Image: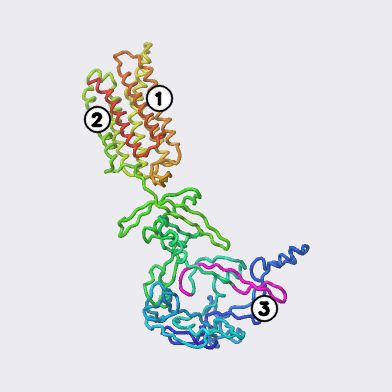
């Protein structure tokens, strides 16, 4: 025992006594560690006789669950007589009354220099501190003194060997301290996994913490150990059986099983702030930082003991993982899953970008899904799987795409043709046939058609929130803007001339009054668009589609529900339908009122094209890029045909 107590070393490798320092704690037995008391867990603290006084079976069952713990107390090493120290903000003075020991030794826990097989060694260039991953020279904590501790002698007994005649012979481990470079005063009864198990008296998993011996972050599974007292049959707690798992070890397991797979697997704590446990990318969610400044990383150094003195290990919440593309995938995927409430049967897409010097160098889309994992003993994790998916880009049309000309050409030609027809029409506005056709409202309709074609250019570009909202406004507003003059013109035509079968009474409706009638229809459309801009605007939404080939990622412009679509169909459809009915009723007008034929043909054309576009967009399964091309072509035909119907016969 004495040799053990003299086996500690200082920073330079010099042998010194293993003595505790003032302020350190030690365990002192009560009555030679023979005194026992009820353990602090709830079952042991129950008064079984009082609870089940009338039921002997339940009382016996209750008493069987009572555990007893050995009584000891924690003492503190104090300075020499009349000295004082501060412990937990309390000043403690060493006097004869407190009887605290001022000097006490301990049996050290010694770490060794090890080789690639994990065995103690001192061969220069072939040893490591503390693991075999990076072999180099082994130094004491001063960073310069090589470890040379070839002590010999009966320092520890490793077991008992039996001779042929049955004589028990102790086995002496005379290599116990070969390569020992640092010694610790280690007592497991202070460690959190031990004290927690003693308090709970049941198996449990610890929260991740820094291991004492190697400064690595890990978790411990602890199971209480009992013995039965021979005298009274009590169940006595005598210790803890613990199994340690480093976070690096968990990451190595994930890497081994998923290294060749495209999927990424990550384990995250369920409790806030959602620390990362490990991932199949090798990320463990821990980093070494300076003890004095956690914002500064620990410098690379071969001397493990010196690094332990100036550095510490801290954990990283999953939201703060930003080091590289894979960490961004994990971080972004978890935050999106959390935002959506971790849907159990739904894959969620996430786009992740990596950047170096503020320049994007990588981009990818993954589909993520999580599953809660809970275990007896306190583990509450969430396992998340992220799989790369194919990116489908046919929902948007960008400059340079093959389909780009098919969208732009009709929009530009349509607007140019409509504007040219408008100029021709206004140029001949003094002619009798143009005057009779109510050229002001016809011109307003043609101008609206030109703007509607230009509005189709908003369909160019990616699906973003701002572009989706602008498309919602431009297309609907300019459609109503073009339709309204046509509608009020048809209504005025019907009010003044009737259906042509009877002579109407003499009346007049001025241009100013007719113009004022247009304003409510336009303002009502603006009101609809404004309400839905705040209530349910068109937004860019990521979605995943499943087929026999795999999973495809899409970004589409959509609303949360179909309310906007229904309101627009009812409102705009009502304008077209009423206009068609009024135009149909005026079909028998005299030849000098030839506008009735153009009105009926134009409104029927708009109704037909609009119906076809609605069917294609909502019944046929096509991508939004295809629908936009179809919409651009449909607007081109609808507007150019209608403008030609009004203008060309009068030239």
Q: Are the residues flagged by discs 1 and 3 in contact, CB closer than 8 Å?
A: no
Residue 417: percent from left, percent from top: 24, 30
Question: In this orientation, which residue lies closer to the viewer: 192 or 93?
Answer: 192
Q: Outermost residue, front direction?
A: 164
Residue 513 visible, this orientation: no
Foreground mark, 1 or 3? Answer: 3
Q: How many marks?
A: 3
Residue under pointer 2? 417
Q: Does residue 431 appear left or right of residue 253 in this picture?
A: left
- The CA distance from mark 1 to mark 3 is 96 Å
Query: Is 446 a magenta residue?
Result: no
Look at 28% across and 32% down and name the residue there: 450
Q: Quadrant of residue 606?
A: top left
Other residues around mark 3 within 10 Å, as few (<14) / some (14–19) / many (≥20):
few
Q: Does residue 343 appear left or right of residue 391 in this picture?
A: right
Q: Are the residues flagged by discs 2 and 3 in contact, CB closer than 8 Å?
A: no
Q: Earlier in the sequence, mark 1 or mark 3?
A: 3
> If the image is split into quadrants, where does the C terminus sit?
top left
């Amino acid at each position: 025992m004495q040799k053990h107590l003299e086996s500690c070393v200082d920073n330079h490798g010099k042998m010194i006594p293993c003595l505790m320092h003032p302020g350190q704690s030690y365990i002192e037995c009560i009555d030679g560690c023979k005194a026992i008391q009820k353990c602090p867990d709830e079952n042991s603290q129950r008064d079984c006789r009082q609870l089940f006084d009338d039921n002997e079976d339940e009382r016996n069952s209750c008493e069987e669950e009572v555990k007893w713990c050995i009584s000891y107390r924690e003492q503190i090493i104090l300075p020499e007589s009349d000295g004082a120290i501060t412990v937990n903000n309390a000043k403690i003075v060493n006097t004869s009354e407190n009887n605290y020991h001022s000097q006490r030794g301990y049996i050290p826990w010694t770490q060794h220099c090890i080789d690639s097989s994990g065995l103690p060694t001192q061969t220069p260039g072939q040893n490591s501190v503390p693991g075999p991953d990076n072999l180099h020279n082994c130094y004491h904590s001063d960073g310069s003194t090589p470890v040379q501790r070839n002590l010999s002698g009966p320092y520890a007994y490793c077991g008992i060997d039996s001779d042929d005649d049955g004589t028990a012979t102790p086995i002496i481990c005379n290599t116990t301290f070969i390569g020992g470079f640092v010694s610790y005063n280690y007592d497991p009864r202070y460690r959190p996994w031990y004290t927690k198990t003693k308090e709970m008296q049941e198996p449990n998993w610890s929260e991740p913490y820094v291991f004492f011996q190697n400064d690595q972050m890990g978790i411990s599974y602890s199971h209480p150990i009992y013995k039965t007292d021979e005298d009274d049959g009590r169940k006595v707690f005598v210790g803890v059986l613990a199994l340690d798992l480093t976070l690096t070890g968990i990451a190595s397991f994930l890497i081994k099983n998923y290294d060749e797979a495209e999927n990424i697997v990550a384990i995250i704590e369920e409790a806030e702030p959602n620390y990362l446990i490990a991932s199949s990318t090798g990320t463990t969610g821990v980093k070494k930082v300076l003890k004095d400044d956690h914002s500064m990383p620990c410098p690379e150094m071969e001397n493990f003991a010196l690094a332990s003195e100036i550095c510490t290990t801290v954990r990283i919440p999953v939201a703060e993982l930003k080091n590289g593309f894979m960490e961004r995938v994990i971080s972004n995927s978890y935050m999106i899953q959390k935002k959506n409430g971790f849907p159990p049967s739904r894959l969620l897409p996430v786009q992740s970008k990596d950047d170096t010097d503020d320049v994007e160098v990588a981009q990818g889309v993954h589909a993520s899904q999580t599953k809660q994992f809970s275990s007896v003993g306190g583990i509450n994790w969430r396992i998340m799987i992220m799989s790369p998916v194919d990116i489908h880009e046919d929902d948007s049309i960008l400059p340079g795409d093959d389909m780009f000309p098919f969208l732009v050409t009709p929009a530009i030609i349509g607007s140019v043709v409509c504007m040219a027809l408008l100029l021709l029409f206004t140029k001949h506005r003094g002619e009798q046939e143009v005057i009779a056709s109510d050229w002001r409202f016809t011109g307003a309709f043609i101008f609206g058609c030109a703007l509607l074609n230009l509005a189709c250019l908003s369909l160019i570009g990616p699906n973003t929130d701002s572009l989706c909202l602008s498309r919602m406004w431009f297309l609907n507003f300019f459609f109503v803007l073009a339709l309204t003059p046509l509608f009020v013109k048809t209504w005025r035509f019907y009010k003044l001339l009737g259906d042509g079968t009877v002579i109407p009474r003499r009346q007049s409706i001025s241009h100013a009054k007719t113009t004022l009638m247009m304003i409510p229809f336009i303002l009502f459309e603006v009101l609809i668009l404004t309400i839905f801009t705040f209530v349910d605007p068109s937004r860019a939404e990521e979605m995943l589609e499943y087929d026999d080939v795999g999973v495809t990622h899409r970004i589409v412009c959509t609303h949360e529900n179909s309310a906007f679509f229904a309101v627009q169909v009812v409102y705009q459809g009502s304008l077209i339908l009423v206009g068609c009915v009024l135009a149909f009723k005026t079909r028998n007008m005299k030849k000098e009122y030839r506008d009735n034929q153009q009105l009926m043909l134009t409104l029927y054309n708009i109704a037909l094209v609009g119906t076809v576009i609605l069917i294609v967009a909502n019944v046929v399964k096509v991508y939004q890029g295809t629908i936009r091309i179809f919409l651009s072509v449909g607007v081109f035909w609808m507007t150019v045909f209608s403008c030609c119907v009004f203008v060309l016969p009068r030239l």
